Amino acid sequence: MQKPKGTYDMFGKDSETYLYFNKIVESLMDKYNYKYFKTPTFELSEVFHSGVGETTDIVSKETYDFVDRGGRNITLRPEGTAGLARCLIENKLYAESLPLKAWYLGSMFRYERPQAGRNREFTQFGVEAYGIDDPSIDAEVISILVNLFKMIGLTGIKVNINSVGDKESRENYRNALVEYFKPNINDLCEDCKVRFEKNPLRMLDCKIDGESEIMKNAPIITDYLTEESKKHFELVQKYLSDMNIDFDVNPRIVRGLDYYTNTVFEVEADIKGSQNVLGAGGRYNNLIQNLGGPSVPGVGFAVGVDRLFLALKEKEIDLREEKTLDIYAFATSENEKDYLISLVNTLRLNGFDVDMDYTSRNMKNNFSRADKLDAKFIIIIGEDEIKNEYVTIKDNKTKEGFKISLNEMIDFLDKKLEGYNEN
Ligand code: HAM
């Protein structure tokens, strides 16, 4: 049997990287005072249809939709923002918790054409900040992304920002786009024709015609911003500069989701082997209202974790915590196995990382197993040890041996390991 196309198994070094990355993210989020949220991996389809937008590629072509056994229309989440907004509304978190800063990490699902850095099930780490319309939080959110990459040692990062304006800016821009595309609409793909009628802004994001000359010469949103949107955008840029964060203004960024207002951004890495947009996001001041909640502004981003790991590999960055086993324990024969099991249990309850021999290997195999597991100490239990209430401990680095009475064992190991970690 094979895994479905566009999914992956994670094990070995990749799992170590993933777990360490989780730790880094958690400590990063503490620094900014964001709180962890977990929402379902599937939602009622309308959450994404009204949230992300019917005419987006994500909703019109890429969602995993199904009817469950109770006849409900369900969608595997293609992204985290709409589900979190639903959570904010359903739990009335807007009533007393605003401003609220949330983060999440988990699987997302999109039926895309798989390639390096583009999967059908992929992991996103994301943040969402609710209840603050001030541009300082847009800048903070961007700074989190930049600092995350800094923390993991990823260089060659470029931040591209743009503004897609408020409702009025976009209405003006929409009219300009309609005027511009009208004479050429028949030269464009079928998707573009539908989008021309329903949501001309989405045409700029077309995967077929997106790179064509017609698109490249299309009017740009920044020429249609209202004074208020312009001011907001200028302040975001100022705050980024205040934090010494380099960025480029790229008026072509429109993003593939409909909920954005004002600030949008994408962060790319200078990598060749896979998709290079590692994270992206923006402000969404109407999403929560569109989903049936009160008027609460939001801003956030999501990082493609799998994509980020590919970038780390390409740059030969080994993001793993050094982890070795404290103790490997074995018995000299099957007769001492029950004693061994109980001893190992005691050691683990006392805070040691312990593995043991389950299969009664011979002495030589046990020593090589201890080496393979990189165990710092080996504990050997034989008939004599049990009878005289002591354990044989071997320092696996110095090869020194000790006979330690049972009631001194924990203290002895604690002291030895303390010294070990200091060396
Ligand atoms: P997005 O641009 O669709 O935005 O996705 C964010 C990031 O997820 C991308 O930059 C990319 O790194 C990663 N990603 C997207 N699709 C895939 C895929 N098929 N395989 C691997 N990685 C992928 C959002 O999802 C918004 N919810 C971000 C946001 C949060 N905006 C405001 N708050």
Image: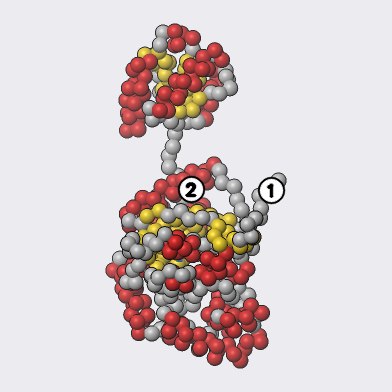
- In the rendered view, would you say 195 is above or below 108? below
Seen from the viewer's position, the closer of residues 384 and 52 is 52
Residue denoted by label 1: 2
Circle 2 residues within 10 Å: few <14, some 14–19, many ≥20:
some
Residue at horizontal 44 percent and vertical 8 percent from the top: 387
Circle 1 residues within 10 Å: few <14, some 14–19, many ≥20:
few
Q: Is residue 162 visible?
A: no
Residue at horizontal 60 percent and vertical 50 percent from the top: 8
Q: Secondary structure at mark 2?
A: helix
Image x and y of residue 43, in percent: 54, 60
Q: Residue furthest front?
A: 70
Q: Is residue 99 left or right of residue 80?
A: left
Q: Is residue 217 left or right of residue 191?
A: left
Q: Is residue 339 visible?
A: yes
Residue denoted by label 2: 18
Image x and y of residue 369, in percent: 53, 26
Image x and y of residue 304, in percent: 50, 59
- In the rendered view, would you say 367 is above or below 36? above
Seen from the viewer's position, the closer of residues 337 and 320 is 337
Image x and y of residue 239, in percent: 31, 70
- In the rendered view, would you say 243 is above or below 390? below
Residue at horizontal 40 percent and vertical 11 percent from the top: 389
Q: Quadrant of the C terminus?
A: top left
CA gap, disc 1 to disc 2? 23 Å
* Kind of residue sitting beneath label 2: Tyr
- In the rendered view, would you say 236 is above or below 25? below
Q: Secondary structure at mark 1?
A: loop
